[in-house]
Amino acid sequence: MQLEFLGTGAGSPGKFRNVTSVALKLLDETNEIWLFDCGEATQHQILKTNIKPRKIDKIFISHLHGDHIFGLPGFLSSRSNQGGNSELTIYGPTGIKDFVMTSLRVSETKLSYRINFIDIKDGIIFENENYIVKAKELDHRIKSYGFRVSEKDHPGELLVEKLKELAIPSGPIYGEIKQGKQVTLADGTIIEGKDFIGRPQPGRVVTILGDTRQTNNIEILAKDADALVHESTFGKQEGNLARNYYHSTNVQAARIARKSHAKQLLLTHISARYTGKLEHQLEKEAREIFPQTKVVRDFDIVDIPLP
Amino acid sequence: MQLEFLGTGAGSPGKFRNVTSVALKLLDETNEIWLFDCGEATQHQILKTNIKPRKIDKIFISHLHGDHIFGLPGFLSSRSNQGGNSELTIYGPTGIKDFVMTSLRVSETKLSYRINFIDIKDGIIFENENYIVKAKELDHRIKSYGFRVSEKDHPGELLVEKLKELAIPSGPIYGEIKQGKQVTLADGTIIEGKDFIGRPQPGRVVTILGDTRQTNNIEILAKDADALVHESTFGKQEGNLARNYYHSTNVQAARIARKSHAKQLLLTHISARYTGKLEHQLEKEAREIFPQTKVVRDFDIVDIPLP
Ligand SMILES: [Zn+2]
Ligand SMILES: [Zn+2]
């Protein structure tokens, strides 16, 4: 489980940061990649990575501002041109389907795969055996969401040594025991599977927020997260600007990371004004409040280790 | 008058060529820039040039395929963010307004300037005192146009030496003579202004085509052009492919350049397959037919000198 940042800038593309997109790479887990937001030229950024567009099967759109969505039509077209043919689902606020479908219709683009659109609202927006994704509304000028991706707990390992101590011969029976079933041995002994399974490995939590000013829902989304991706459009001294423009500062993000007991804070949506020393300062100010903070850059890859 | 190529690739962006866009720089002439097509990340390409988005006051869209239009919403937004506030006109096939307005509406983008949309069809689509632009339909899978931009003839210079020979004193009267008016001198002599004006300097012609397979209209658009920008999606051996996919080959472009007596041929819309030796060959094959051929690359600047 890794985050690969494809665009970490705010508003307009700059020389050093593209507009917003981040990939959640679930390659070791379930061999798929999820994209969060898709600003213009996200497909160009992907060209410089080892990400294969056909592996991206879900795209989550936090909000409909242009710097978060204008790369969608091009990405979808190229995914098709490059042989992607598996279904793709786009989760986003109402309006995303209108934008994508108009773009494809006007340009007479025929995709080689089907797109599902899911209009999001507060609550569980996706769940399968491996993951659960919850959305909650944030506080931006336009409807904006944050996402809490929770990996389900990994079942415990089979305690092979313990089975061997009891001289239980290996075979298909081990599979049944691993599933926690009750099993009767040849000699009539009854074995409870659950006694031979180690502690489940808790799943990881990654919280990725859209643009927002400070609001209570952030803490709920970020509670005990292994990684919190939070915008930081403004710096410490600009709290009023941040509030007026519906954005956050670096130190606001750091405070919420501390309060919600996140394990690491990744600051993104960085204004082009913050380069060199100023970028360093942005990180430093946040670290004074929450030491595990990083101002991410385009193409940064951040591991989310198992706890 | 210069052409600056911002994207010279075909279909999808590649590592070396972005999707289509070319700027016609009229800075010395009328201090403006016109854009022809606007594929995704055209604004990113512009960031690497000295082009100021606010100087772009006209955008001509040849056809609605995604690789020619998906950069429009982002370009328009950034032009506004960067302080552009002068009116901008978009000329394109029916549908371009739908795409642009849906993108701006869904993303709640408020521009600081007004956009006019002009639906194009065959004929004169723009004319002022300096330029005339004619469009003609080409032959692509979707409605596609070529543009012939003609600079109006520059009026001849005032023949000051000749006036001095006649001992006509300089003053406001020179202005009237330069305008070709009939003027009566203090001594009653009548002067015909046109006798004191040099030969007019013929204006230049630049022809920029959208994607197309070979069709008679190309020759009409390209007749005696100072520069012909022609797509070359396929190579010499791929005439059938070109026809089937509604595109052209390098040698078809060269033949039409020769036939229409163009002064130079600029091949663009180059497939990502043509790199290194193959790219060189694409140019070589065309030069065997029309020596003044160049396969252009992103950021190439081509001067269109006065004849
Ligand atoms: Zn926003
Ligand atoms: Zn086309």
Image: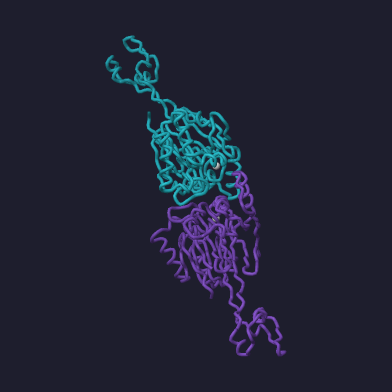
Chain colours: A cyan, B purple
Name the quarter showing ligand 1.
Answer: top right
In this view, B35 is above or below A268? below
The quarter of the displayed image where residue B181 is located? bottom right
**Residue A50, x across and y down, in percent:** 40, 44
**Residue located farthest toward the top when viewing the structure as drawn:** A188
The quarter of the displayed image where residue A164 is located? top left
In this view, A244 is above or below A154? below
The count of marks equals 0
The quadrant of the image that shows the N terminus of chain A is: top left
In this view, A297 is above or below A224? below
Please tell me which residue lies in front, A257 or B210. A257
**Residue A65, x across and y down, in percent:** 56, 43
Residue A236 in the figure: left or right of residue B139? left
**Residue B131, x across and y down, in percent:** 62, 68
Residue B228 in sight: yes
Residue A130 in sight: no
**Residue A198, x across and y down, in percent:** 35, 20
The quadrant of the image that shows the C terminus of chain A is: top left
Residue B235 in the figure: left or right of residue B38? left
Please tell me which residue lies in front, A66 or A131. A66
In this view, A133 is above or below B212? above
